[in-house]
Image (cartoon, coloured by chain):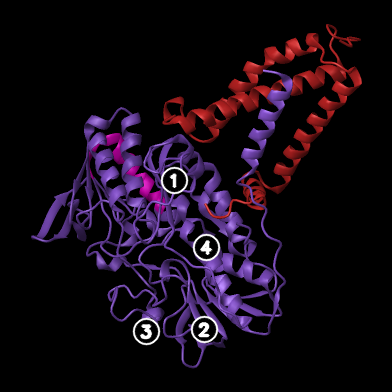
Chain colours: A purple, B red
């Protein structure tokens, strides 16, 4: 090859590499307003939105209400619950993420009066708002599983990683014993909507892999209890998981919803279409039913005809704007949309809410829409994952089509989860991604 | 992934390494590159004597880079599962090799070793 040929090839290569890197459009001029925006919840959605709004609005009063002073990086909990990361990997100081100029009220919301446009906190303060963004997350309903209580996590072969860093670390203590001693492992998920429906699968795959690496796979009986007749909400992914389970020797049982647990006898009771069924376990991973916080339901903000036992906020699927109260938006887990209870979804939703909120303040109509984007780096063993991305229509929407195959177990997808995800999440919190 | 812009990438890298370490590493890479260009211009040619040691160091750089990435990410060679993984793997190795070669060449050209001292070609 002549040198000139080589150089033009190199230039082409460099151009191709640079092509996807579109420079962000110059920031639009901030909209001047004296509106009072109240954000309920300083989790992934509330924090990211606050950081974006302070840049988009000039003169607005922004109040964020959340009693918690620590921020939890929830996508990391599956790694803590398998001993791959320490508990403090997911913890940070909330104050570090909130922008200057935002008023932070460290209290719990008791009620929203959508007619009077006020929020009342549990310590009795009433806060009037012009615009309200509901991003309080969801509630883990442990009480719905009879015989279960949070202090059991980590004892009697019980794990429950959703409860936070401490629960995830205690889950690993119980799970680790199981990977060493063997027996029957039962992995459950609730029949309600839940955050990251991939997490129960990840936990199953990882525990199986850890036992396998320790040479204990012959001592293990792995049982995955699905809540209906699928293993994942997106049919093509469900089918792939079924194949992987077959390959790993993980036995699925369908339409088994955990209803009770007897820690002493290590016996779990499941509701099935044929009545209740009992399964003995040596290790059980419990994910309780998940619901909107009580104040959402008692304030009349939920869907009346959908998810009536769960109470998610009645919003438009595309704009996340409340269908009866246009000055209210919902963001993240609490939003009553069919998909989207992951941090990656929040990343998409934040810019949609930002767009419609700022446009409305400016007297315009917003244009951005949310199409249900949800992403899950579905870990299938330590070192490999499938980068599953999908939308409302159960279509796969790969970010890197032709490069990163969504249904293939790849090292690069693991690298994304292990290295890039938390960094991307933090950049999102700061409003930079 | 949404809107993979240059700013997003910078923000993500800042988060991975921390703002100071990231920019320190960028500065170090820029410095080594500038020094490399400086010695090339100064010497007006590539010294094949210096390049020999640089070349010999390349496999060391490749192995070190791969080892570093594998160790930092709980990964093993057996995790490579598809073509894109092979590309990433080779990319890490090549980056390590080239980085090491440039670094060794530059250090040798700036400080000089007994073998190449006074060498201008």
Write down the residue under mark 3.
A298
Q: Position of residue A247 (x, y in %)?
A: 25, 34
- Distance between the alpha carbons at the discs numbered 3 and 1: 35 Å
Q: Are marks 3 and 1 on the same chain?
A: yes
The dot on residue A327 is 2
Q: CA distance from mark 1 to mark 4?
A: 18 Å
Nearest to the observer: residue A363 or residue A330: A363
Q: Is A172 colored magenta in this rendering?
A: yes
Q: The N terminus of chain A appears in which quarter of the rendering?
A: top right
Position of residue A268 in the picture relative to residue A59 (left or right): left
Q: Nearer the viewer, mark 2 or mark 1?
A: 2
Circle 1 residue: A79
Earlier in the chain: of badge 3 and badge 2, it is 3
Q: Which residues are magenta?
A: A168-185
Q: Is residue A25 left or right of residue A143?
A: right
Total tally of numbered discs in the picture:
4
Q: Is residue B96 above or below residue A183?
A: above
* N-terminal-most mark, 2 or 4: 4
For the C terminus of chain A, the image quarter is bottom right
* Real-space Cα separation, disc 4 to disc 3, in angstroms: 24 Å
Q: How many residues crowd mark 1 within 10 Å: few (<14), some (14–19), many (20+)?
A: many
Q: CA distance from mark 2 to mark 1?
A: 38 Å
**Real-space Cα separation, disc 3 to disc 2, in angstroms:** 19 Å
Around disc 3, counting alpha carbons within 10 Å, would you say few (fewer than 14), some (14 to 19), or many (20 or more)? Answer: few
Q: Chain of mark 3?
A: A
**Secondary structure beneath label 3:** helix
């Amino acid at each position: 090859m002549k040198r000139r040929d080589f150089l033009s090839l190199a230039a082409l290569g460099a151009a191709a590499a640079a092509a996807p890197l579109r420079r962000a459009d110059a920031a639009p001029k901030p909209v001047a307003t004296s509106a009072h925006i109240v954000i309920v919840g300083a989790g992934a959605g509330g924090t990211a939105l606050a950081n974006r709004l302070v840049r988009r609005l000039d003169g607005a009063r922004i109040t964020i209400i959340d009693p918690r002073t620590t921020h939890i990086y929830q996508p990391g909990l599956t790694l803590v619950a398998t001993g791959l990361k320490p508990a403090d990997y997911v913890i940070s100081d909330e104050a570090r993420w909130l922008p200057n100029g935002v008023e932070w009220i460290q209290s719990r919301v008791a009620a929203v009066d959508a007619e009077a446009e006020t929020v009342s906190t549990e310590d009795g303060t009433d806060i009037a708002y012009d615009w309200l963004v509901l991003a309080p997350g969801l509630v883990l309903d442990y009480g719905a599983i009879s015989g279960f209580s949070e202090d059991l996590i980590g004892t009697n072969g019980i794990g429950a990683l959703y409860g936070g860093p401490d629960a995830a670390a205690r889950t690993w203590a119980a799970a680790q014993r199981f990977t060493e001693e063997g027996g029957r492992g039962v992995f459950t998920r609730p029949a309600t909507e839940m955050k990251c429906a991939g997490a129960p699968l990840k936990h199953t795959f990882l525990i199986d892999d850890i036992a396998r690496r320790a040479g204990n796979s012959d001592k293990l009986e792995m049982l995955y209890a699905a809540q209906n007749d699928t293993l994942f909400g997106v049919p093509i992914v469900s089918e792939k998981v079924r194949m992987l389970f077959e390959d790993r020797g993980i036995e699925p049982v369908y339409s088994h919803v955990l209803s009770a647990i007897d820690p002493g006898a290590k016996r779990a009771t499941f509701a099935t279409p044929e009545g209740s069924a009992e399964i003995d376990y040596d290790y059980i991973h419990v994910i309780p039913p998940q619901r909107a916080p009580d104040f959402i339901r008692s304030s009349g903000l939920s869907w009346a005809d959908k998810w009536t036992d769960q109470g998610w906020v009645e919003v438009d699927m595309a704009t996340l704007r409340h269908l009866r109260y246009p000055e209210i938006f919902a963001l993240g887990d609490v939003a009553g949309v069919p998909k989207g209870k992951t941090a990656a979804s929040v990343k998409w939703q934040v810019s949609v809410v930002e767009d419609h909120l700022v446009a409305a303040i400016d007297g315009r109509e917003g244009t951005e829409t949310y199409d249900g984007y949800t992403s899950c780096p579905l870990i299938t063993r330590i070192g490999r994952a499938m980068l599953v991305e999908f939308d409302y229509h159960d279509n796969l929407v790969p970010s890197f089509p032709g490069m990163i195959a969504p249904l293939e177990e790849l090292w690069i997808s693991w690298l994304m989860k292990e290295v890039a995800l938390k960094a991307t999440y933090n950049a999102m919190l700061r409003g930079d991604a | 992934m949404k809107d993979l812009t240059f700013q997003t990438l910078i923000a993500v890298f800042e988060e991975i390494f921390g703002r100071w370490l990231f920019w320190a590493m960028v500065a170090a890479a820029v410095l080594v590159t500038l020094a490399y260009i400086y010695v090339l211009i100064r010497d007006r040619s590539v010294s094949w004597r210096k390049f020999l040691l640089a070349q010999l160091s390349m496999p060391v750089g490749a192995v070190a880079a791969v080892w570093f990435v594998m160790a930092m990410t709980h990964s093993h060679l057996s995790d490579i599962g598809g073509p894109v993984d092979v590309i990433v793997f080779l990319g890490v190795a090549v980056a390590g090799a080239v980085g090491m070669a440039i670094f060794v060449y530059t250090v040798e050209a700036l400080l000089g070793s007994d073998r190449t001292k006074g060498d201008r070609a």
